């Protein structure tokens, strides 16, 4: 799960769920008759406390969990986010009529009023997030990327180098001699020098983040995604092929990012 994929709209949903949970412990309705008064909370009616208030809180949890997962999950054909939004709408609808249809001699308490407002905000935030660009911005700021090393290189002083073999009189893990391509063994004495290898394209690996969720495709050209890049997470670009990038995920998978528009370089 990646909490950095949460958006501002998800933050609205989380805040509304917290307020709704608190409201369930406040006075739901108060009564006064013949000089006597009494009150009850939402939890005095299990259908209201567990079915409406906690139902909306559980719905908010489904929305947030669905956002953090790499791929949307479905239960009985319904997306978890859609199911959570449905819980929020149902809670707001039920609390609205509980607020309107207050019997004579009964007053709506702070728990009912605050609960309706929180449920309405929860449902509104869940519905508006896919539609309002301002709510789609990342909730948590992206971490500052560390300076990347050339792809495949090891830090100086590390144990050994790829392709290097111990030579007589040369400590194991020592760097190649000046003018010698990385990983190539020194030519034996008296051997004719080989032609210099062409220099690679002028490309330096860099860190980047995507503005929206984008698929990562295999390097063999197939169109079945192997991973999904999420906003708010930094990935390493190790190669450039025209307008496309070869990206590496945090778990070491490599693939082709076909849509590079709007990416943020670290």
Image (spheres, rainbow, N blue to C red):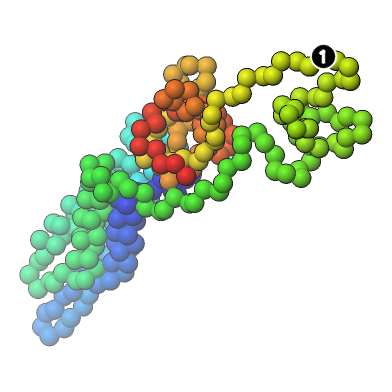
Extreme-bottom residue of the structure: 35
Drawn side of residue 58 relative to residue 252, left or right: left
On screen, residue 47 versus residue 200, left or right, reads left
Q: Is residue 193 above or below residue 225?
A: above
> In the rendered image of this protein, does residue 103 appear above or below residue 32?
above
Q: Is residue 226 visible?
A: no
Mark 1 secondary-structure assignment: loop
- Which residue is more in the foreground, 14 or 259? 259
Residue 1: image location, x then y, percent: 48, 44
Image coords of residue 224 (percent x, y):
45, 21
Along the line of sight, which residue is nearer the eye, 10 or 192? Answer: 192
Estimate the x, y position of residue 201 in percent, counting from the top left.
55, 25
Which residue appears at 21% of the width and 55% of the height?
120
Rendering coords of residue 200 (x, y %): 59, 24
Image position of 219 with respect to 111: above or below: above
Which residue corresponds to the image point at 25% horizontal and 44% vertical from the top-left? 133
Report the side of 161 relative to 221 (left or right): right
Instruction: Report which residue position mark 1 lands on.
Output: 192
Few, some or many residues within 10 Å of mark 1 (<14, 14–19, 20+): few
């Amino acid at each position: 799960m990646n909490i950095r994929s949460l958006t501002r709209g998800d933050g609205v949903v989380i805040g509304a769920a917290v307020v709704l949970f608190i409201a369930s412990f406040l006075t739901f309705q108060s009564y006064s008759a013949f000089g006597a008064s009494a009150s009850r909370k939402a939890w005095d009616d299990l259908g209201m406390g567990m079915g409406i208030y906690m139902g909306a809180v559980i719905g908010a949890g489904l929305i947030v969990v669905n956002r953090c997962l790499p791929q949307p999950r479905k239960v009985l054909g319904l997306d978890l986010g859609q199911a959570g939004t449905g819980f929020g709408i149902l809670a707001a609808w039920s609390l609205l009529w509980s607020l309107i249809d207050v019997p004579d001699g009964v007053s709506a308490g702070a728990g009912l009023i605050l609960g309706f407002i929180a449920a309405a905000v929860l449902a509104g935030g869940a519905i508006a997030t896919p539609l309002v660009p301002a709510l789609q911005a990342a909730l948590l700021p992206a971490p500052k990327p560390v300076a990347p090393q050339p792809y495949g290189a090891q830090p100086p002083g590390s144990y050994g180098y790829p392709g290097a073999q111990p030579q007589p009189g040369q400590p194991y893990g020592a760097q190649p001699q000046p003018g010698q391509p990385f990983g190539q063994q020194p030519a034996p004495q008296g051997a004719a020098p080989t032609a210099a290898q062409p220099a690679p394209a002028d490309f330096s690996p860099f860190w980047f983040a995507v503005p929206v969720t984008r698929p990562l495709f295999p390097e063999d050209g197939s169109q079945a995604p192997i991973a999904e890049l999420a906003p708010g997470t930094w990935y390493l670009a190790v190669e450039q092929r025209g307008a496309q990038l070869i990206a590496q995920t945090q778990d070491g998978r490599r693939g082709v990012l076909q849509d590079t528009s709007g990416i943020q370089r670290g």
